[in-house]
Image: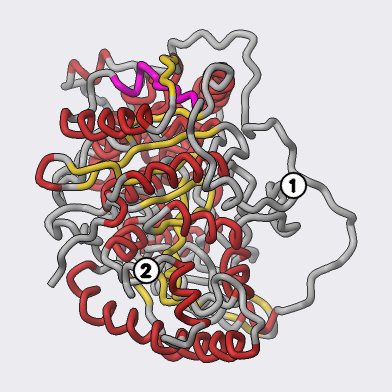
Amino acid sequence: MITYCTDFDKAFATMSLSQADVEKVARLARLAMSEAEIQTAQAQLTHIFDLISEMQAVDTKGIEPMSHSQDLAQRLREDVVTEVNQRAVFQAIAPQIEGGLYLVPQVIE
Amino acid sequence: MINATIKQLGAALRAKQISSVELTQLYLDRIHQLNPQLNAFITLNADKSLAQARAADARLASGDADVLTGIPIAQKDIFCAKDWLTTCGSKMLNNFVSPYDAHVISQFNQAGAINLGKTNMDEFAMGSSNETSHYGSVKNPWDIQRVPGGSSGGTAAAVAARLCVAATGTDTGGSIRQPAALCGISGLKPTYGVVSRYGMIAFASSLDQAGPMGRSAEDLAILLNTMAGFDERDSTSLQREKEDYARDLSQPLKGLRIGLPTEFFAAGMGGDVAQAVEAAIAEYKKLGATLVDISLPNSRLSIPVYYVLAPAEASSNLSRFDGVRYGHRAENYRDLTEMYEKTRAEGFGDEVKRRIMIGTYVLSHGYYDAYYLQAQKIRRLIAQDFVEAFKHCDVIMGPTSPSTAFKLGEKGDDPVQMYLSDIYTIAVNLAGLPGMSIPCGFGDNAMPVGLQIIGNYFEEARMLNVAHQYQLATDWHNRAPSLG
């Protein structure tokens, strides 16, 4: 399949998403999308990536990434059972259960 | 009564001028009358609320009452509340009756507060206008053609319209402060880790924080005292000595150094917002503060950094919504993958899907370093700017929002336009700092303007003091919209 670049702005944008990119991301995210939705998403996401592109040029050599403002790690605890089994309560709101198990379409033959 | 402070209501309850049942019924009647115009609430349950009120009255009678006992509080629909429908503003959870209480909810329950109902919000907390909710947009009580802000739009509208005494919100990129500003009320986002996120439906786990929203700093302090504190069930909850956030409210402001970032006063802010904020700062000078020019040079990168990090974390957090254990499940599917894909396509709105896709992309193979890692590094630069600035000032001030409330539908089909509303609030979340918004006047179209107060880590008591002293000298926080 040949894709034509009909939009010069897109050609010169720092990050331009192709239709294949959007389809791949939708599959990874487990989101069903129609042809029309993919096209709309392509335009909108490209526009959002234009916004994001501003940070690409910043020199961050030697800077450590920060995932927590006080650089704390998540607390650990002793590996002992502390929770009470509440399966019946939690499964009361499940879409489909049987015998204490959650039901989904067959995966393994 | 609807303009009374929590303290005044507590005194009235103890003096038996009113019972909690009567007070709760008063608010339920107001909600019945006014909520159809505003759509601030998603779920109400008069039976449950009044049952709590009766229990509160019993506690009050026996003398075993706390400051919040008998006080009706609304809860943002992002907090799981046992046996309450908890939707997070989404179709995905339109049938989710929570089997447990969030930490925040159980704190209020233990204090004897009344759960008045679940407030409307942008879907999964993603939005700045409360227009992405599956349950319809919320209207700003000051002008029902305008947005209340988001994502805690329902809470902000409910507080402004006096449909509750006070309420809870959450803030990931400004979602407490911006709606507080647009609705003319007070709201506070605490330092990251101060309020437990257990049972608070996760959007971006390194940024989310719950906080109080109400009509005065004094009321916010009371709510924060109930909300804050260590919870072992949240692995990011901080173990710190218990604080009374109201302890410094009466401190005079003489000698307070207020930092004014050049970047927050540059072009991009409406003239009407600038005017109201500058008048507020002039008032602070009269109260004894000195002004210090500071710079937050990397704050200009806040928006691109946030729109990489928050969607990335959201894409991970929202992967649990797959139709297996709870929530919406598609009706027709041929296999497991199709079940997931259709369930999620049907259950999520457009903005949520956009953000999940951005997040998935920036975390994917080949792009992680260029986007996610780069954003995390710039995040450190943004946080470092604040650390440096706080060497020269005690609090930082500026506008909360670049404009007053815009019209419903105005930001139209362009998501980026909406993202730019958070320009002054986002850096605070990235740095994990506490931030507040308090009303400081009115702008164009007689719509409220909010002043943002940013404090250093764990400086909530000082910020509440700074807000309270201003609220003693001015009356913006006592203004109320006139409703039908």
Find the distance from the CA under tag 1 to the CA under tag 2: 32 Å
**Residue B375 position in % (x across, y down):** 51, 24
Q: How many marks?
A: 2
Residue B261 in the magenta stretch? The answer is: yes
Range of residues picked out in magenta = B256-265
**Residue at image point 69% right, 50% down:** B237
From this view, report whether residue B366 is shown above or below residue B158: above
Residue B430 in the magenta stretch? The answer is: no
Q: Amino acid at mark 2?
A: Ala
* Quadrant in which the C terminus of chain B is drawn: bottom left
Residue pointed to by mark 1:
B240
* Secondary structure beneath label 1: loop
Tell me, for residue B382, which label it has, or none. Answer: none
Quadrant the N terminus of chain B occupies: bottom left
What's the chain of the residue with tag 1? B
- Residue B24 in the image, given as x and y percentages of width and height: 40, 83
Residue, disc 2 = B4
Residue B198 appears in the figure: yes
- What chain does mark 2 sit on? B
In the depicted view, which residue is nearer to us: B460 or A25? Answer: B460
Other-residue count near label 2 (Cα within 10 Å), few / some / many at <14 / 14–19 / ≥20: some
Q: Mark 1 belongs to which amino acid?
A: Arg
Q: Image quarter for residue A23?
A: top left
The answer to whether mark 1 and mark 2 are in CB contact below 8 A is no
Classify 10 Å Cα crowding around label 1: few (below 14), some (14-19), many (20 and above).
few
B45 and B258: which is toward the camera: B258
- B407 left or right of B96 in image: left
